[in-house]
Image: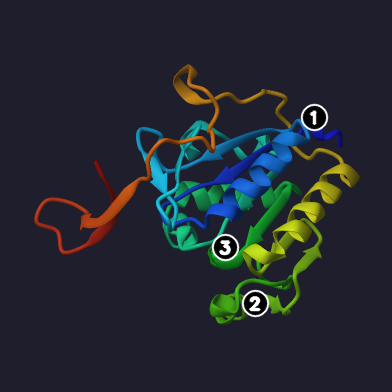
Amino acid sequence: MNLANAQIAVLAEHLYQELELWYPLLRLREEGANVVVISPRIDQPYASKLGYPVTGDLTPADVKPEQFDAVIIPGGFAPEGIRRDKGMVDLVKGVHDQGGLVAAICHAGWVLATAGIARGRTVTCVSLVKDDVINAGGNYVDQPVVRDGNIITSRLPSDLPVFAREIVKYLREEPSRRSSDEKLKPAQDRPFSSAAFDKPVHTAMGPRGKASANYITVVVQ
């Protein structure tokens, strides 16, 4: 496909790894692709492991798998939150099942396992989650980048050059699988997500609800 016509989702949650989100996002925007950040909410920023913020352009409820040629899942500890969000998981599985690209790096192997798309596929990931991938039916290998059909995986931030290169190569070689020509824009007429920021985002653990013993990550204003 022509990369200038590609539409790509990058998933975001708290504690993402900075380079694993921004490197492929900016690389694909450089190629002219329409890249949107999908997060559970768009009324708050999401903090990386070091407090680097990203604000989603759209939520899973705003989009459909058929609107995307690819979905990219960064690592860090964001995949723990992503795999708990049914809308995010359904988006990943939907893009995969229509033949679109799913690219996952580092801990994002967790999301492949939860979406049920690791089974029977040769994949890599950070070694800390390889047992989860193997138990989900994946064939784990320790390599910088692995392409098996429409799944591309890598292990660590140091693998990002080959990870991004393989994503670009795949999209140039493969036809578009999406059935919608709608060009997505951020909700509420906002500008697209940007790596520019003036202060870090701080997070803490807070109760999921009133008098709840269950905790979630929250933004501290």
- Gap in angstroms between the C-alphas marked 3 and 2: 15 Å
Q: What is the crowding at mark 1: few (fewer than 14 residues within 10 Å), some, or many (at least 20)?
A: few
- Label 2: state its secondary structure: loop
- Label 3: state its secondary structure: helix
Q: What is the crowding at mark 2: few (fewer than 14 residues within 10 Å), some, or many (at least 20)?
A: some
Which of discs 2 and 1 lies nearer the camera? The answer is 1
Q: Which residue is mark 3?
A: 108
Percent across and percent down for residue 130 are: 60, 79
The residue depicted at 76 percent of the width and 30 percent of the height is 32
Q: Which residue is mark 2?
A: 137
Amino acid type of disc 2? Gly
- Which quadrant of the structure image shows residue 123? bottom right
Is 49 placed above or below 47 here? below
Percent across and percent down for residue 51 are: 40, 51
Relative side of 127 to 148, left or right = left
Percent across and percent down for residue 55 are: 45, 37
Q: Which mark is residue 4?
A: 1
Which of discs 3 and 2 lies nearer the camera? The answer is 3
